[in-house]
Image (tube, grey):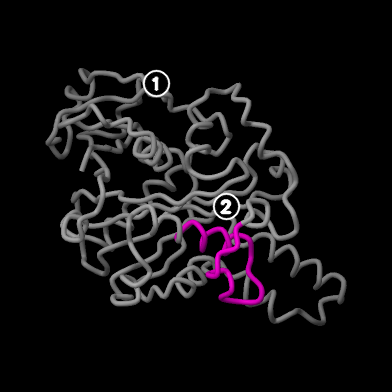
Amino acid sequence: MTCDIVLTGIGLLSPLGGKESFFRAMGEGAESPCRTAGNASLPPGGLTELLGIKSPKLQVARYLDPLAKNAIVAVEEAMGDAGIAPQAVAQDPYGFGILLAATRGPGATRDKAYEQLRARQGKLLSSTLFSNFGYNVPAATAAMAHGIKGPNLTVAGRSNLSLILLRRARQLLATERCHTVFTGFSESLANGEAARPVPQWSCIFCLERAERARQRGARAGVALTEIELESPGLVQPRSCALAFRLPRPIPQPLPLAALAGAETLDLDLGDPLDIGPEYLPLLQAGRIKATERLRGEETGYVVLPVSSRHGLCLLGVARA
């Protein structure tokens, strides 16, 4: 399945703030002064308390793992950014799905459960903690909070996590399991990685089938597609900090000669926030949309190289 999907909305929260400040920091280089903003210790309530978020959607349960809280708020913001009202979900709950990536799952709740088991010598465990550290709990809780009854899945991966999300979202959309998928990341780093500039964050994208977006009169979005290469295992990116411009439509699979002669773009694809390479491709696509980097691109694709276990892949971002 090689169909394009359209990114129409983004919801993001982090210690740096919302999507504007987050994507701005992503493009400010390795010495970005915003790097220190995320080092402040989070309050007991986590990121939502730090940012003063009081969404009524957070009342879905008495206790929520921070990953679930962040995912609920990020989905709500992505819906608003895409122009999807809660009433639209209520009228067609099976037409919407949630696809979440959380590499460690609800780690904060899991740690609390381990501490309780040790304190009680393994004889007793709170049912509240037990029911909130399952791996799919953040996606399932976000679905319940927003009345979404389509697929809700949590996936794992490392080097090619962004591609796994995009492929699974495209599969759900192309097979008409749903017409809109809220997909993205909800992460809380712990133990030795808590000193990272952004120790806790969530970013959710609203992805739709193009005809659905046009039908409901969605605001301008961007088209995303994964571009296959003739011999991906034999090709290495010229530089991990380079993006390319390719004309539209792109042949599938893409001849290697077309890649070798492609025009390079001045687009910083570094990782100043130390987010991790598994997240960057989709985050960079979101940054392109949020910062309107495609304003002058009428017909072509901005192409981002993505390393995977099978070699080089390409993620194409174009005006929808």
Give x and y (percent) for residue 169.
32, 57
Q: Quadrant of residue 66?
A: bottom right
Q: Quadrant of residue 319?
A: top left
Residue 153 in sight in this render: yes
Q: Can you tell which mark lies on residue 187?
A: 2
Query: Left or right: where does residue 235 sit relative to residue 205?
Result: left
- Residue drawn at 58 percent across, 34 percent down: 274
Note whether 148 is above or below 230 in the view shown.
below
Q: Quadrant of the C terminus?
A: top left
Determine the CA span between mark 2 and mark 1: 28 Å
Q: Can you tell which mark lies on residue 73?
A: none
Query: Left or right: where does residue 13 sit relative to residue 250?
Result: right
Amino acid type indicated by mark 2: Glu
Question: In this picture, which residue range is highlighted in magenta?
Answer: 53-75
Q: Main secondary structure of the magenta part?
A: helix
Q: Quadrant of residue 197?
A: top right
Is tag 2's residue or tag 1's residue first in the polypeptide sequence? 2
Residue marked by disc 1: 239
Element type at mark 2: strand
- Residue drawn at 60 percent across, 40 percent down: 16
